[in-house]
């Protein structure tokens, strides 16, 4: 984390100090942030402000508005979209994975494996196009643009975000299916499964009580990690469907080179990544008491 | 518990075989191992055999080969350059040859309102009409008639143009040599009829400028652009005639003093003009996009860029990664610690930040493609390096290395002759899987307009997609082919790479499917 912050101040150098709108206030702010001083000094000032909860202001977009305020506006959309995605994707992914593990090497398994391979290989913007063209345009199932407004949890809003949710869910379902299948296959061939069957459990009982629980040991932390990743949003899908979320903000900050947004969003993403990693590590111990993190 | 003994000699069975019937198979001499009748199979050949048994991978590699050939050959033979465009033949549909009929002939089934129907009919863009139907529109509150037509997207009709005297003379001379249907110059039109219409002044001027923009309106239209018919139900043309009743084919411009200039306005049939200029009718095998670029050619250029970038980045990453990882792994200790921390720091950088940085700083000096390449290389080798490092830790303490060192082999020789050949297997296969990753990142970045690889000499698939996206609901053809191409490329590379990995490391089979 420290390394990133240290390396990132680079863009300050190339950010031209021109600003539209209220120029005097902007110059005053630049002055306060120590521009024209050595980078390390600027960095010190930045960290100082950062620790006090001042993340800077928009210099190229949302001019003179607080970065944290804009961020707070954008987060609900992203969280909403990703929340529904998870709600759809997790059960489906687990189901397909378990189904194809149980039918291993039969045609159902082959079929699901090929589908998973296709969905994972095809870039996400391609199925954005497909979903948009067929579901929204040809068959009119969903509106083409999402509703305006900020009530991201009302049914009509969710309905209008459905295409984006579907696109995001496809990738998650495929990943989860593949992972579940691999884990469950391994568990199903282990010896305690044979024992479970030998002591008289039916196949269903043995699978659900024994195999599935043990397969969940690596799967559950992965799901938790993805839930934490809810916050980060998706660059392509948000951009495509015009969801006013964090991903769009990030792309815009790169394109207009707004240093403060860029910096803040990068740190935000890194923080989420670290948080997800932490949650994953902790949850291993939670789901399987035999695993003690850090013990010898 | 009493058990039945199985296999006890049956007393009644007495095999009476003469002793003479038993002979020794061989009494004198020794038995040596006979030579194998099969051919020797090396590691590489074994891998190839295993690979070719995997049907999916073989199919994928054939498709991949076709895609590569396509992107290499097409730019040379398609007849269009990457920067060639025609401003009028935009959003055309696929047409395989200049006179194609039936399949892929550049026609489109449509159902249009009456004013559009008469508009298309006016310049002959309609191949055939499949009748009409009427429905009640709730929004407007009256019946609307729709016409089912098959539209030729390669007929654009008349365009206004301004040319010089000598060019005009050439066109006039050309028109005298061809029959009516191929004449370039059309009669000029004028819109004085609008003044007599029963509409307000503002609508009049709007209508006038609307008509003046499109040379295909040669007939009187009303406020809603429907043709006005005379008492016999015929369309009323707007042609300008001179005193003796002949059509005028050009108008000479005058300067501010009212003197005639060397500029003439003409109303030319652009389809015929294209034939006059190029000698054949226009056709785009995969259609044309909204600027008028040929998709077939552009796709090949974009694919070529993606493939070259992918292969070059992957190979540089391998070389860098091998050298770095080999030094780390072989020397270990403090060297390893320092170098590991350095690559840790690099790997912490989000790739999109690196790309943006390189794009800002380097593009001005080396161009967008090279700066993107640097950006990919700058962090891409870390994965390879850590694989190589692991492999070196595995092999460097084995006995054969000790033996070689005892015999006096130098570090250089140990690294490159003894350890690397053993360690390189997983590296090579993982680098094949690196190529689709690079292609995906490249197309994503250019799709999101973070980088712009499009220039006069090349384009990228991501750029084609983001250009087509604005109008893709009306013209899905513009993004269909780039999408199809990149999807196929990604799928084939992944299947091919997985097949290769399974073939070279059978123990890893299925782990990444």
Image (cartoon, coloured by chain):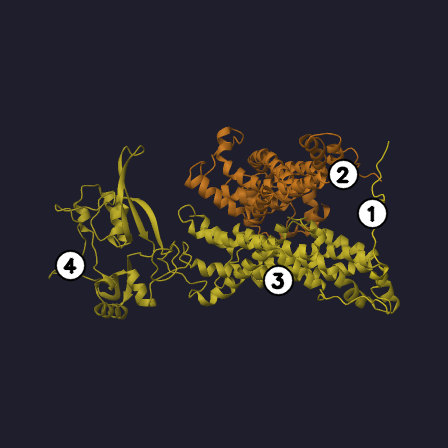
Chain colours: A orange, B yellow
Give coordinates of residue A125: x percent, y percent. Answer: 52, 47
For mark 2, does the 10 Å Cα neighbourhood hold few (<14), some (14 to 19), or many (20 or more) residues?
few
Q: Are marks 2 and 1 on the same chain?
A: no
- Image quarter (top left, top right, bottom left or bottom right) of the N terminus of chain A: top right
Label 3 vs label 1: CA separation?
80 Å
Q: Going from the N terminus, do you reach mark 3 or mark 4 first?
A: 4
Left or right? Give the position of B359 relative to B410. Answer: left
Q: Are marks 1 and 4 on the same chain?
A: yes
Front position among marks 4 and 2 = 2
Q: Which residue is mark 1?
A: B13
Give the answer, above or below, for where B348 lies relative to B5. Answer: below
Q: Are marks 3 and 1 on the same chain?
A: yes
Q: Which residue is mark 3?
A: B312
Cβ–Cβ under 8 Å for marks 3 and 4 = no
Q: Which residue is mark 2?
A: A191
Where disc 4 sits, the SS reads: loop
Q: Which residue is mark 4?
A: B241
Who's the residue at 87% across and 63% down the image? B402
Cβ–Cβ under 8 Å for marks 1 and 4 = no
Front position among marks 3 and 4 = 3
Cβ–Cβ under 8 Å for marks 4 and 2 = no
- Image quarter (top left, top right, bottom left or bottom right) of the C terminus of chain A: top right
Cβ–Cβ under 8 Å for marks 3 and 1 = no
Q: Pick whichever, A69 or B318, lies toward us.
A: B318
Q: Chain of mark 2?
A: A
Whether residue A284 is visible to the viewer of this picture, yes or no, is no
Where disc 3 sits, the SS reads: helix
Q: Residue B340 falls in which quadrant of the image? A: bottom right
Give coordinates of residue B373: x percent, y percent. Answer: 61, 59
Where disc 2 sits, the SS reads: helix
Label 3 vs label 4: CA separation?
66 Å
């Amino acid at each position: 984390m420290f390394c990133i912050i240290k390396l990132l101040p680079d863009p300050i150098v190339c950010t031209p100090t021109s600003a539209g709108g209220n120029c005097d206030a902007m110059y005053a702010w630049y002055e306060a942030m120590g521009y024209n001083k050595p980078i390390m000094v600027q960095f010190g000032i930045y960290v100082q402000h950062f620790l006090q909860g001042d993340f800077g202001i928009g210099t190229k977009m949302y001019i003179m508005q607080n970065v944290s305020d804009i961020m707070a506006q954008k987060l609900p959309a992203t969280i909403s979209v990703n929340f529904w995605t998870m709600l759809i994707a997790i059960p489906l992914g687990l189901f397909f994975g378990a189904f194809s593990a149980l039918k291993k090497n039969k045609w159902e398994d082959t079929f699901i494996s090929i589908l998973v391979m296709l969905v994972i290989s095809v870039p996400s913007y391609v199925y954005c196009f497909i979903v948009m063209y067929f579901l929204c345009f040809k068959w009119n199932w969903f509106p083409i643009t999402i509703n305006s407004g900020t009530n991201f949890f009302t049914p009509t809003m969710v309905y209008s975000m459905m295409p984006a949710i579907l696109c995001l869910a496809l990738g998650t379902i495929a990943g989860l299916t593949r992972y579940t299948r691999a884990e469950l296959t391994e568990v199903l061939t282990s010896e305690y499964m044979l024992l479970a069957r030998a002591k008289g459990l039916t196949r269903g009982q043995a699978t659900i009580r024994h195999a599935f629980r043990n397969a969940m040991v690596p799967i559950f932390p992965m799901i938790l990690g993805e839930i934490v990743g809810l916050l980060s949003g998706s660059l392509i899908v948000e951009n495509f469907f015009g969801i006013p979320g964090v991903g769009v903000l990030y792309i815009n900050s790169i394109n207009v080179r707004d240093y403060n947004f860029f910096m803040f969003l990068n740190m935000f993403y890194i923080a989420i990544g670290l948080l997800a990693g932490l949650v994953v590590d902790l949850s291993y111990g939670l789901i399987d008491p035999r695993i003690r993190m850090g013990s010898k | 518990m009493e058990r039945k003994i199985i296999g006890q000699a049956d007393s009644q069975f007495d095999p009476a075989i003469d002793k003479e019937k038993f002979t020794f198979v061989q009494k004198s001499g020794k038995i040596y191992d006979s030579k194998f009748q099969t051919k020797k199979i090396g590691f590489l050949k074994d891998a190839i055999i295993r690979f070719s048994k995997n049907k999916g991978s073989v199919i994928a590699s054939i498709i991949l080969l076709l895609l590569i050939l396509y992107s290499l050959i097409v730019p040379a033979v398609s007849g269009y350059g990457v920067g060639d465009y025609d401003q009028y033949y935009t959003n055309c549909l696929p047409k395989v040859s200049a006179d194609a009929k039936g399949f892929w002939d550049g026609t489109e089934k449509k159902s249009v309102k009456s004013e559009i129907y008469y508009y298309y009919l006016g310049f002959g863009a309609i191949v055939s009409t499949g009748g009409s139907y009427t429905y009640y529109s709730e929004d407007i509150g009256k019946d609307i008639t729709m016409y089912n037509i098959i539209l030729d997207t390669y007929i654009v009709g008349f365009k206004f143009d301004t040319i010089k005297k000598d060019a005009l003379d050439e066109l006039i001379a050309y028109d005298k040599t061809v029959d009516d249907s191929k004449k370039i110059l059309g009669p000029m039109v004028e819109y004085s009829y609008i003044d007599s219409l029963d509409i307000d002044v503002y609508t009049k001027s709007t209508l006038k400028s609307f008509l003046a923009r499109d040379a295909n309106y040669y007939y009187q239209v009303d406020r809603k652009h429907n043709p006005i018919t005379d008492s016999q139900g015929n369309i009323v043309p707007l042609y300008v005639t001179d005193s003796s009743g002949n059509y005028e084919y050009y108008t000479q411009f005058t300067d501010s003093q009212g003197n005639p200039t060397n500029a003439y306005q003409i109303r030319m049939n652009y389809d015929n003009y294209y034939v006059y200029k190029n000698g054949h009718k226009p056709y785009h095998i995969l259609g044309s996009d909204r600027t008028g670029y040929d998709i077939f050619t552009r796709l090949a250029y974009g694919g070529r860029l993606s493939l070259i970038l992918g292969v070059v980045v992957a190979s540089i990453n391998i070389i860098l990664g091998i050298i770095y990882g080999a030094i780390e792994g072989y020397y270990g200790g403090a060297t390893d610690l320092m170098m590991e921390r350095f690559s840790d720091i690099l790997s912490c950088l989000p790739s999109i930040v690196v790309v943006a940085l390189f794009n800002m700083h380097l593009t001005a000096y080396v161009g967008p493609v090279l700066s993107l390449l640097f950006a990919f290389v700058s962090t891409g080798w870390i994965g390879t390096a850590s694989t190589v490092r692991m492999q070196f830790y595995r092999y460097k303490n084995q006995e054969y290395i000790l033996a070689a060192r005892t015999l006096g082999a130098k570090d250089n020789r140990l690294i490159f002759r003894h350890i690397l050949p053993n360690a390189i297997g997983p590296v090579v296969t993982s680098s094949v899987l690196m190529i689709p990753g690079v292609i995906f990142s490249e197309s994503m970045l250019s799709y999101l307009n973070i980088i712009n690889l499009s220039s006069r000499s090349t384009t990228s698939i991501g750029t084609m997609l983001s250009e087509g996206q604005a109008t893709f609901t009306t013209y899905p053809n513009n993004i269909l082919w780039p999408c199809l191409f990149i999807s196929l490329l990604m799928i084939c590379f992944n299947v091919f790479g997985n097949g290769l990995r399974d073939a070279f490391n059978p123990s890893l089979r299925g782990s990444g499917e």
